[in-house]
Amino acid sequence: MLIISLSLFASLFYVLATGHVLSRLFHKEGPSQKLTIIFSTVAILSHMLVLVNSVFTQDGQDLSTINVALLTCWVIVVSVTTVSLKFPATLLLPVVYGFAALLLVASLFVPHHIVMKSLDVDIGLVVHISLSLLAYCVLIIATLYAVQFYFIDRRLKEKDLAIMHSHLPPLMQVESQLYQLLTVGTGLLTLALLSGFVFLEGMFAKEFLHKTVLSLVAWAMFSAVTIGHHQFGWRGKSVVFAVLGASGIVTLAYFGSRFVQEVILGKF
């Protein structure tokens, strides 16, 4: 009952934050940062309590796909909210807050209980998981910047006066931050894959083959875009679609098979 109440409470404040930002999206002064931070902070703290009570149970640690997704989402929300304190992130906030609200509500209806009575601490495994989670979060934030870049660029080309006088960030600033995030995220993903090959056995075993192959494909796409931009000046719509495709592939690699097995097939 506590988890249900906390999830709904967090979702409510995520929705309030989303509604506030969207209501002043094209206003010259933009949404009130103070009000946005109040709403989001309450939501983030409630979200954190949901994670603590969901993962750490009396029987052990529940590390189901839904709980891992809630943790990943929480890290992304905290990161984007922190970035918004220094840089304009008006378009990113309603996306991450809205998705967090939907995920919290969905978690109440999706079965997700994989309890591990004890966790064997393996340094190599911890390094690999930490790098993978960090890489995924940075690359998803980069993807959000790519979507923001595409939206602003398209509205500017259409000579939309509303966006020219809005609180949205300058296009060149968004583009610069996009490629900075892509560079960092691709580097972290490279380290995550290398740590997997070094510390883990069976990266190409049958049960993990699809994850490894999909991760390598996503890495190749992110690397090509990053190198192409720095060496050949690649930019624009094709880069945005490549980033979106790579993000979809890496998401499928990280969460796809476990979601099917846990939720659809109910094997655990």
Image: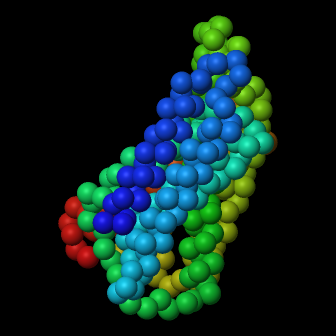
Residue 78 in view in this figure: yes
Quadrant the C terminus occupies: bottom left
Image quarter of residue 210: bottom left
Image quarter of residue 207: bottom left
Horizontal relation, residue 85 to residue 127: left or right: right
State the residue at coordinates (55%, 59%).
45
State the residue at coordinates (63%, 23%).
152
Residue 254 in view in this figure: no
State the residue at coordinates (47%, 89%).
119
User: How many callouts does the rendering have?
Assistant: 0
From what the image shows, is residue 150 above or below residue 262?
above
Q: How is the image coloured?
A: rainbow
Image quarter of residue 75: bottom right
Quadrant the N terminus occupies: bottom left
Give the image location of residue 43, x and y in percent.
52, 51
From what the image shows, is residue 59 above or below residue 74?
below
Give the image location of residue 105, x and y in percent.
35, 51
Front in this rendered view, residue 30 or 89: 30
Horizontal relation, residue 248 to residue 184: left or right: left
State the residue at coordinates (35%, 87%).
59
Front in this rendered view, residue 255 or 5: 5
From what the image shows, is residue 161 above or below residue 106?
above
Give the image location of residue 74, x and y in percent.
54, 58
Horizontal relation, residue 262 to residue 229: left or right: left
Give the image location of residue 229, x and y in percent.
73, 39
